[in-house]
Amino acid sequence: MKKLIVFAIAIFGFTAVSFGQPGNTATATVGASIITPITISATAMNFGTILAANTGTANVTIAPGGTTTYGTGLSYYSNTGAIATTPATFSVAGNFNNSYGITVTAPVSVVNGAASMAISAWTMGAFSGAGSGTFTLGAGTGTGTLSAGGTETFSIGATLAVTAGQLAGVYTAAAPISVTVIYN
């Protein structure tokens, strides 16, 4: 019986060695990629210091490129203390060549106490910085693509309606132009 046990152990021992397969190993690399967060900064829009006539309603229009036109009876007051006209300019920075979504909320008027002036005809200028983009202000949304350097700039203009006998003073919007950008 002792021989039978030794024989059985020998057979099972050789069987395991004879029919066993060597283990195989595979490896996988592990990594992560961090992109630059998207940011946006702005400069204020200002319709400037306006000298208004006493009759009729006329418009002041700031084009996104900065050109300002004055309707009949209106002109830019350029003496001491005058405020320059400027479109709102937005600078976007982030991960190079990435596309992003744009959402704009714009005010509809500026106020000075009980007096107000309507703002309309919001327009967005060309994208610069070697990026690209499209935008429909009426819909409030658009898209852009950052340049190879990871930047892009665009400007927004509008039209201000100045009525006859408009109260003198400083007019401000209750809420600013709000532009939100997010990676697509």
Image (cartoon, rainbow, N blue to C red):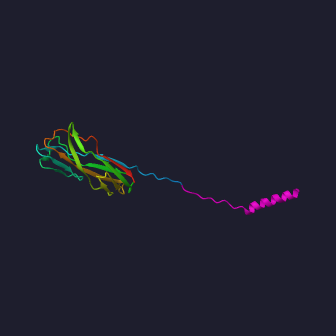
Predominant SS of the magenta segment: helix
- The reply, left or right, for residue 159 in relation to residue 37 is left
| Span of residues in magenta | 1-29
Residue 75: horizontal and vertical position, in percent? 14, 47
Q: Is residue 94 visible?
A: no
Residue depicted at 78% across the width and 59% down the height: 13
Residue 151: horizontal and vertical position, in percent? 34, 53
Looking at this view, is 125 or 146 the one in front? 125
**Would you identify the image quadrant in which residue 171 lies?**
top left
Quadrant, the C terminus: bottom left
Residue depicted at 27% across the width and 51% down the height: 155
Residue 58: horizontal and vertical position, in percent? 15, 48
Looking at this view, is 128 or 171 the one in front? 171
Quadrant, the N terminus: bottom right
Q: Is residue 51 visible?
A: yes
**Would you identify the image quadrant in which residue 146 lies?**
bottom left
